[in-house]
Amino acid sequence: MKSEPMTTWTPTNAVQPKRDVWQAMARGFRGRCPNCGEGHMFRAFLKVADHCPACNEDLSHHRADDLPAYLVIVIVGHFMVPLALWIETNYAPPVALQLAIYLPLTLVGSLVLLQPVKGAVVGLQWAVRMHGFGGSED
Ligand SMILES: [Zn+2]
Protein backbone atom coordinates (compact mmCIF):
# COMPACT_ATOMS: atom_id res chain seq x y z
CA MET A 1 0.00 0.00 0.00
CA LYS A 2 1.37 3.35 -1.07
CA SER A 3 1.23 6.06 1.55
CA GLU A 4 0.49 9.65 0.67
CA PRO A 5 2.79 12.35 2.00
CA MET A 6 1.23 13.98 4.99
CA THR A 7 0.32 17.63 4.54
CA THR A 8 0.00 19.87 7.50
CA TRP A 9 -1.28 23.38 7.91
CA THR A 10 1.44 25.82 8.76
CA PRO A 11 1.27 29.55 9.35
CA THR A 12 2.89 30.12 5.94
CA ASN A 13 -0.27 28.72 4.32
CA ALA A 14 -2.38 31.33 6.08
CA VAL A 15 -3.73 34.33 4.19
CA GLN A 16 -1.20 37.09 4.46
CA PRO A 17 -1.97 40.80 4.29
CA LYS A 18 -1.80 42.41 0.85
CA ARG A 19 1.20 44.51 0.04
CA ASP A 20 0.95 47.74 -1.95
CA VAL A 21 2.49 46.86 -5.32
CA TRP A 22 2.92 50.43 -6.59
CA GLN A 23 4.41 51.66 -3.34
CA ALA A 24 6.85 48.73 -3.25
CA MET A 25 7.85 49.32 -6.88
CA ALA A 26 8.28 53.06 -6.29
CA ARG A 27 10.46 52.39 -3.26
CA GLY A 28 12.48 49.88 -5.24
CA PHE A 29 12.81 52.35 -8.11
CA ARG A 30 14.39 54.79 -5.65
CA GLY A 31 16.74 52.02 -4.46
CA ARG A 32 14.99 51.69 -1.12
CA CYS A 33 13.69 48.66 0.72
CA PRO A 34 10.18 47.78 -0.52
CA ASN A 35 9.07 47.06 3.04
CA CYS A 36 10.12 50.18 4.96
CA GLY A 37 11.29 52.60 2.25
CA GLU A 38 14.26 53.62 4.40
CA GLY A 39 17.11 51.13 4.01
CA HIS A 40 19.15 50.85 0.83
CA MET A 41 18.16 47.90 -1.34
CA PHE A 42 21.50 47.65 -3.15
CA ARG A 43 24.90 46.87 -1.65
CA ALA A 44 26.57 47.44 -5.05
CA PHE A 45 25.42 48.76 -8.42
CA LEU A 46 23.23 45.77 -9.20
CA LYS A 47 23.77 43.59 -6.11
CA VAL A 48 20.71 43.45 -3.90
CA ALA A 49 21.50 43.36 -0.19
CA ASP A 50 20.50 40.16 1.59
CA HIS A 51 18.68 42.12 4.29
CA CYS A 52 17.43 45.66 4.63
CA PRO A 53 19.81 47.56 6.92
CA ALA A 54 16.90 49.50 8.43
CA CYS A 55 14.12 46.94 9.01
CA ASN A 56 16.04 43.68 8.43
CA GLU A 57 13.54 42.52 5.77
CA ASP A 58 14.94 39.51 3.94
CA LEU A 59 15.59 40.61 0.35
CA SER A 60 17.57 37.54 -0.67
CA HIS A 61 14.51 35.94 -2.30
CA HIS A 62 14.57 38.23 -5.33
CA ARG A 63 15.00 36.62 -8.76
CA ALA A 64 15.06 39.59 -11.09
CA ASP A 65 17.29 37.75 -13.57
CA ASP A 66 17.21 39.42 -17.01
CA LEU A 67 13.88 41.21 -16.70
CA PRO A 68 15.41 44.58 -15.70
CA ALA A 69 17.72 44.48 -18.72
CA TYR A 70 14.85 43.63 -21.07
CA LEU A 71 12.73 46.44 -19.65
CA VAL A 72 15.59 48.92 -19.95
CA ILE A 73 16.06 47.95 -23.60
CA VAL A 74 12.35 48.52 -24.22
CA ILE A 75 12.28 51.86 -22.40
CA VAL A 76 15.49 53.28 -23.89
CA GLY A 77 14.58 51.94 -27.33
CA HIS A 78 11.21 53.67 -27.20
CA PHE A 79 12.98 56.98 -26.63
CA MET A 80 15.99 56.57 -28.90
CA VAL A 81 14.36 55.12 -32.03
CA PRO A 82 11.69 57.83 -32.42
CA LEU A 83 14.30 60.48 -31.61
CA ALA A 84 16.67 59.13 -34.25
CA LEU A 85 13.87 58.88 -36.82
CA TRP A 86 12.64 62.40 -36.08
CA ILE A 87 16.13 63.90 -36.30
CA GLU A 88 16.92 61.99 -39.50
CA THR A 89 13.62 63.00 -41.09
CA ASN A 90 13.87 66.68 -40.20
CA TYR A 91 17.61 67.43 -40.21
CA ALA A 92 19.45 64.48 -41.81
CA PRO A 93 22.78 65.19 -40.07
CA PRO A 94 25.89 63.16 -41.03
CA VAL A 95 25.82 59.55 -39.85
CA ALA A 96 29.01 60.03 -37.80
CA LEU A 97 27.39 62.86 -35.89
CA GLN A 98 24.28 60.79 -35.26
CA LEU A 99 26.35 57.88 -33.96
CA ALA A 100 28.35 60.24 -31.76
CA ILE A 101 25.08 61.34 -30.15
CA TYR A 102 22.94 58.19 -30.10
CA LEU A 103 25.48 55.65 -28.89
CA PRO A 104 26.59 57.53 -25.75
CA LEU A 105 23.00 58.61 -25.06
CA THR A 106 21.83 55.01 -25.30
CA LEU A 107 24.67 53.78 -23.08
CA VAL A 108 24.15 56.44 -20.42
CA GLY A 109 20.37 56.05 -20.50
CA SER A 110 20.69 52.29 -20.05
CA LEU A 111 23.15 52.59 -17.17
CA VAL A 112 21.08 55.25 -15.42
CA LEU A 113 17.87 53.20 -15.69
CA LEU A 114 19.24 49.74 -14.90
CA GLN A 115 19.40 50.02 -11.11
CA PRO A 116 16.03 51.77 -10.67
CA VAL A 117 14.29 49.27 -12.95
CA LYS A 118 15.88 46.35 -11.10
CA GLY A 119 14.77 47.90 -7.82
CA ALA A 120 11.22 48.19 -9.13
CA VAL A 121 11.25 44.55 -10.27
CA VAL A 122 12.49 43.41 -6.86
CA GLY A 123 9.82 45.58 -5.25
CA LEU A 124 7.18 43.94 -7.44
CA GLN A 125 8.41 40.47 -6.51
CA TRP A 126 8.36 41.41 -2.84
CA ALA A 127 4.85 42.90 -3.05
CA VAL A 128 3.32 39.84 -4.72
CA ARG A 129 5.33 37.50 -2.45
CA MET A 130 7.18 35.73 -5.24
CA HIS A 131 10.10 33.38 -4.69
CA GLY A 132 9.92 33.03 -0.93
CA PHE A 133 9.07 36.67 -0.20
CA GLY A 134 5.84 35.30 1.25
CA GLY A 135 7.62 33.26 3.87
CA SER A 136 7.58 29.95 2.01
CA GLU A 137 9.89 28.24 -0.42
CA ASP A 138 10.04 29.23 -4.08
ZN1 LIG B 1 13.52 47.90 5.11
Image (tube, rainbow, N blue to C red):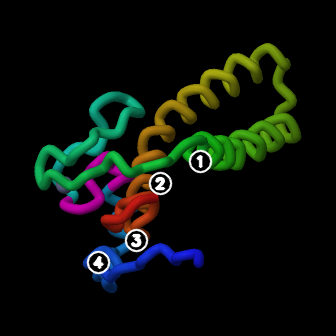
What is the CA distance from the residue labelled 4 to the residue labelled 3? 25 Å
Q: Position of residue 113 (x, y in %)?
A: 49, 40
Assess disc 2: are there few (<14), some (14-19) or many (≥20) residues with their C-alpha within 10 Å of its C-alpha.
many
Residue drawn at (59%, 47%) of the image? 67
Q: Secondary structure at mark 4?
A: loop
| Residue corresponding to mark 3 | 21
Nearer the observer: mark 4 or 1; the answer is 4
Q: Mark 2: which amino acid?
A: Val
Is 5 positioned to the left or the right of 89 in the image? Answer: left
Residue contact between numbered discs 4 and 3, judged by CB atoms under 8 Å: no
What is the CA distance from the residue labelled 3 to the residue labelled 2? 10 Å
Q: Mark 3: which amino acid?
A: Val
Residue drawn at (45%, 63%) of the image? 130
- Between discs 1 and 3, the one toward the N terminus: 3
Q: Which mark is residue 52?
A: none
Which residue ends up furthest to the front in the rendered image?
A: 1
Q: Secondary structure at mark 1?
A: helix
| Residue corresponding to mark 2 | 121
Instruction: Confirm whether residue 117 shows in the render.
Output: no
- Between discs 4 and 3, the one toward the N terminus: 4
Q: Position of residue 110 (x, y in %)?
A: 56, 34
Residue contact between numbered discs 2 and 1, judged by CB atoms under 8 Å: yes
| Residue corresponding to mark 4 | 10
Q: Secondary structure at mark 3?
A: helix
